[in-house]
Image (cartoon, rainbow, N blue to C red):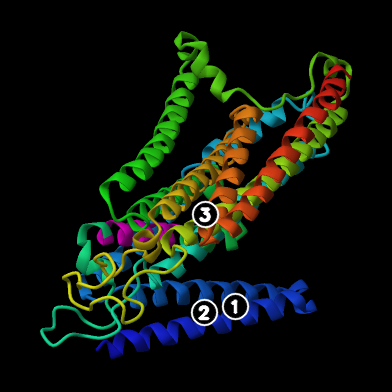
Amino acid sequence: MHLKRYMAFYHCNTAAFVASVVVIIIVQSKVLSTVWGAMLLKTAMILDLFGLMGAYVAGSCRDPTTTIFVAALAVAVFLYTMAKVVAVVHLGGESFRQRGEEATQGAAQVPPLGSERILEEKKLERKRKFLLQLAILAATVTYQTGLNPPGGFWTESNGDKLVTAGDPILLDYYGVRYQVFFYCNAAGFMASVTVILLLVNQTLSKPGIRTKALYVCVMVGLLGLMGAYAAGSCRKLRTSIYVFALVAAVVAFLILEILLHWLGRRGWSKCLPKCLTRLFETLSTGPGGGSKNKSDQEVITTVDKLESEDYEKRKYLMVLGILAASVTYQAGLAPPGGTWGDDDTASSSPLPSPSAHPPTVAGNPILLDFNAARYQAFFYCNATSFVASVVVILMLLQRTTKKQQPGAPLRALQTAVVLDLLGLLGAYAAGSCRDWETSSYVIALVAAVVVFTLIYVLLSFNVVRAKAEE
């Protein structure tokens, strides 16, 4: 039915796969240390990413309109990012020269060995790794769910041509919901691939990080993930309201953070209530009053050590958030038990088929019809864990965005991580079992983990207090 579209998807996906294998071979060989190897590696990675984009455009759409839109979306995101990069490279040259003159005039106060520049390079490299991790997460899950949307596909066409084999079931039953999922997922995928394309080239990634263009693309990718999850994981208004409320809370947090930063730059933050400004206090401070008697090199070394420790903590939290967001996103769009329409138990027409069981609708979760309470427990726990994961990622990303590194208090990050893990445990306990015997066993394991965590936290208070006194 879509021979040309399938051939385009097949060749693009195959090219991306072969390019990925070439990248792995080059990285594991000694050729990477040569100029030719570096050029070959970049070429293979760019071919890989463009192959993924072509395969996504060809495989996720069924009509020319959506195909053109997705392709235009990719071009728009790429042009926006390149425009920001070109602007900072060409228009920012004067400011860079002015900074160099100021540094020359204040040579008596700046260490001549370029230690600050080395610190700046380390910060940029760490930010690049953070952004690359997030972009890989978003690109991976959005690519898979874009080609295999929630609800599955029609396995055959009926005689009246009301449905077509290979078309998404969700599109025929919940057209608006599917459109929201499709465009949000496409926006997240294209933004993520654009970030990866620019991060591959360090010459373009540095101005992209400085102008916050890559951060904007990552934010678009994460918001696209949340929008796609909210639209694709629900079928009823009640559950949709819950997920959209969580997404709205995250968006409100972002708007509040941007507003406070904007007011702080203009000196108006003192007029705000302390309860708002305390939300964005720094997690750790640099060397204090005793650092005045130290040399510049010692101060820089101390700052580098503190930032390295803080970076390690944020890296582990980021990996945890990425892992949880990835598994909960996929589990929410492909719930346990599958959906109606994967076999012959549901009707292939848009009308529910009468049977001995309650009326079933193709594309709806099977577990919802046979064990609604268990499915509801899984759904709410999984949605809570997914949103908590995104909150952790956004908090960590917000902390790496600014030079002074403001961020949410460590208690807020720890609370979000604990909520994330508890949601994962609850979703697993509800979705992996079908009877109370196995459920009680899993719940007992979950309770044991929670009790162990509480005991560990209580025993750690004395250690933390002793370190704080030191």
Of residue 429 and residue 138, the one placed in the foreground of this image is 429
Q: Residues within 10 Å of mark 3 (few under 14, many from 20)?
A: many
Q: In this view, does 328 lie above or below 278?
A: below
Of residue 265 and residue 192, the one placed in the foreground of this image is 192
Q: Which residue is drawn at 27% across and 87% down?
A: 2
Amino acid tagged 3: Ala
Q: Name the residue under label 3.
A: 430
Q: Is mark 3 on a helix, strand or loop?
A: helix
Disc 1/disc 3 C-alpha distance (Å): 37 Å
Q: Which residue is drawn at 50% across and 71% down?
A: 49
Is the C-beta separation of discs 1 and 2 under 8 Å? yes
**Residue at the outermost left position:** 160
Q: How crowded is mark 2: few (under 14 residues within 10 Å), some or many (20 or more)?
A: many
Q: Name the residue under label 2.
A: 16
Q: How crowded is mark 1: few (under 14 residues within 10 Å), some or many (20 or more)?
A: some
Q: Name the residue under label 1.
A: 20
Amino acid tagged 2: Ala
Q: Which residue is drawn at 64% across and 25% down?
A: 282
Q: Where is residue 33 in the image (x, y as percent from the top left)?
A: 77, 72
Q: What element carries label 1?
A: helix
Quarter holding the N terminus? bottom left
**Span shown in magenta:** 178-191
Residue 459: mark: none
Quarter holding the C terminus? top right
Q: Is residue 430 magenta?
A: no
Q: Where is residue 40 in the image (x, y as percent from the top left)?
A: 63, 78
Main SS category, magenta section: helix
Q: Position of residue 101 (x, y in %)?
A: 65, 32
Please tell me how many numbered marks the rendered image carries.
3
Q: Mark 1 against mark 3, which lies toward the viewer?
A: 3
**Residue at the outermost top position:** 271
- Whether residue 117 is visible to the viewer of this picture, yes or no, is no
